[in-house]
Structure formats: C-alpha cells, structure tokens
Image: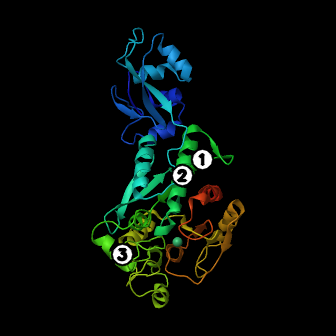
Amino acid sequence: MDVQVRSGDSIWYYSQLFNVPLKFIIDSNPGVNPSQLQIGQTIRIPAYRSEPYTIEAGDTFWKIASDRRIAMDSLALLNQTVNPQQLPIGAMIQIPSRVTERIVNGNQNYDSTVLQFDLDVLLQLYPFVRTETIGNSVMGKDLIELQIGKGTKVVHWNGSFHANEWITTAVIMQFLNDYLLALTNKETIRGLDVNPYYDQVTLSIVPMVDPDGVDLVVDGPPAGPFGDLALEINKGNTDFSGWKANIRGVDLNNQYPANWEIEQERKPKEPSPRDFPGYEPLTEPEAIAMAELAQARQFNKMLAFHTQGEVIYWGYEGLEPPESLVIVNEFERVSGYQPIKNVYSFAGYKDWFIQVYRKPGFTVELGRGVNPLPFSQFDEIYQETIGIFLASLYM
Ligand SMILES: [Zn+2]
C-alpha cells in the first residue's frame, strides 16, 4: 500500500500508525532517506492493502475506523483530498486493510506461471523482499532469486532442480508466505518468534531451478522446437510425469564437477527424461546460474529440496564440516526424516557445494511415494518441512 507523506509525518509515525515494525517500512523504501521525508513523497507500507469503500448514510471517519479497529488518522492519511466533515454519500474512499491471510496456495499444479503470479503479489505486499534474475532457462524464462532479511548469515534454499519434483516449489513458496505473515504481524511459527531471524539471516531462495521442465511436466510439451525435442527425447510419449531433466534432456542435478565422470560413465549417454549428466559438466544455463549464485552469495548453509523418500543427504566424500552432523540431527528431530551421510551418487549441487565451499549442504527428500507426489500429501509434507525451514534459520 502506498501513502503520500504529509507535513509532520515520519517513518516512525507510520510504524506506530499501522503497527508494522519500523525495519520493514524502512526496507520497503530503499531509495528513501528515513530522516528526510519530503511532503508528497510516496512511501510503501508493507503488509497492507488499500481497499475502496463507498460512503453510506451515517458514516464518519470515526465510525469507519472504530468498526475496523484501525487508527482514524490512517483514514485521513489515505484520503487526503477528502474532507471528513463533509462525507458525501456514495463517495469512494480508501481504507487500509492489514494482510493476515496467505496468498500462496501450494496445493495446486504449481508451474512457472503460478509462481510468477504469486511472486508478483508477494512483492507488491512485501516490498522488503528483494528479487534478482540470476539467469535464464534454456527457453528464456527468468530464473528468480528472492532475498529476505539483513543478516550476515546467508542461508539458501532451492526447489525444483528436478522437473517432476515441482511440489518442492509449492512447499517453499507457501512457507515463504507464512514467514512474511509472521514477520509483519508479529506472530510466531510453531511457537518460535521468527523476528530475530530477519536481522540474523539473509535468506536466499531460488524457488524453481528448472521452470521449463516443471512446465513440461505440469502443462505438457510447449508448441515449437523445444516441445518437439522433448517429445522426441520422451520417445513420443505425451506423459511427462517421469521427466526430471531440463527441457533438452539434461539432469541439472547431475551437472556439477564433483566426480561428474562417474555419473557420465554409468548414466545415459544422450539426452533423456532423467539422469543424463550432459556431455560435459555445467553446460546448462540453469546449472551454471546456480553455481554462479553460490559463488556470489557465499552461502553459509544450503538446502536443496527434492522428492521423495523422507531422508536428508548431508555428506560428500568426508568434505562436509563437523557442524553438518549437528544440523542434520536437528532436522531429523523436527521432521522425523532420516539423515543419510553417504550414498553412491555424485555431481549433484549439494556434492559440488560441499566440495568447493566445505559448508553444510543438504539434499532434503520430501514426502514418500512416486514422483510427482500427489496433492493428497501436500499438507503432510508441508507440516514436516516447516521444522526444517525453521531449523535452517536458527541452527
Ligand atoms: Zn530430485
């Protein structure tokens, strides 16, 4: 919601007026000097919507405000051209409305269009969330990173490295929405006060690493050469539910230079719905963007969300730091998921991340069943994952 500064207003006053922590208003207005507001300047108030209302007989600002338990001056602020002494019946005014409900519904076919829609709404409501385009998919779709918080500890989550595991994007986005609601409404999640995490942690999220692949699984092959190629790789089968790769048949989580040659040796030698590691490491734009992001951000901790198995892989060739074990034990405690240190698998993002940075990296396998996991599991998976999300922030 936008407001226009009046004489005597301050950011601190808006924080009181709307009962929103000061830091979220300041961070929602990055170009603004909070100590030098200009009259008429636009200030964004996070976690609020401005809703139109038509004046009825007997209305006064006092009545409208007290009915909704909002400050009367917030009405004056939003309706500066309206004379509260002369409210004409039928006139339209704006009423500030606090956002207390989720926008994101993860329990649906969550393709890149749904993601973009939800991102647009969340960024409008919570302008202190920062976004960056870290690259483009093979088909040119933006690869989006979100950043929340101001801490020196950088925690990274990603979803949908594998196309038919797109439920991971839905889980991440719904939790992001709950985190933003808790921050701005001063609520807890599972009894935890999350407010300190905003100051302690910079949370980096890439909700959908493989948007082309996700759209292929959810919506079917696109018209044009990329759809034709995917159909050819899929041997003419129009059922893409088993597809894990990007749109040209490279498994993005087999693309990293961490014993990549072992995967090359034993995996498919040409583009395939799953497991083809590419002709060389890091040939695919999605994989490259994620490698560059790790280098740019220097994550302190990395969680890659996959499905399925209810297990958490946390080691790589003994290169993981000792704290990885402490963290994964906490993940186990809060989710019931089983930690697995080593597995005969290489060239994944987690493997490469641990090898290069020697920081805690995890592959979290949500849920149990056959990918893509059915909606009926969404709420259960979401509940299991909340604890892992939170632990990744406080551990
Ligand atoms: Zn996977």
Q: Position of residue 334 (x, y in %)?
A: 69, 59
Q: Which amino acid type is shown beneath numbered disc 3?
A: Leu
Question: Do tag 1 and tag 3 residues touch (Cβ < 8 Å)?
Answer: no
Instruction: Check disc 2 and report its element: helix, strand or loop.
Output: helix
In the image as oriented, which residue stretches furthest toward the bottom? 265
> Please, is residue 133 above or below residue 235 in the view?
above
113 vs 180, nearest the viewer:
113
Residue at point 42% right, 16% down?
Answer: 55
The residue that mark 3 highlights is 231
The residue that mark 1 highlights is 196
Residue 360: in sight, yes or no? no
Q: Which amino acid type is shown beneath numbered disc 1?
A: Pro
Q: Which amino acid type is shown beneath numbered disc 2?
A: Gln
> Please, is residue 378 above or below residue 371 in the view?
above
Which of the 4 quarters of the picture holds residue 37? top left
Figure label count: 3
Q: CA distance from mark 2 to mark 1?
A: 20 Å
Disc marking residue 174? 2
Q: Position of residue 285 (x, y in %)?
A: 35, 71
Q: CA distance from mark 3 to mark 2?
A: 32 Å
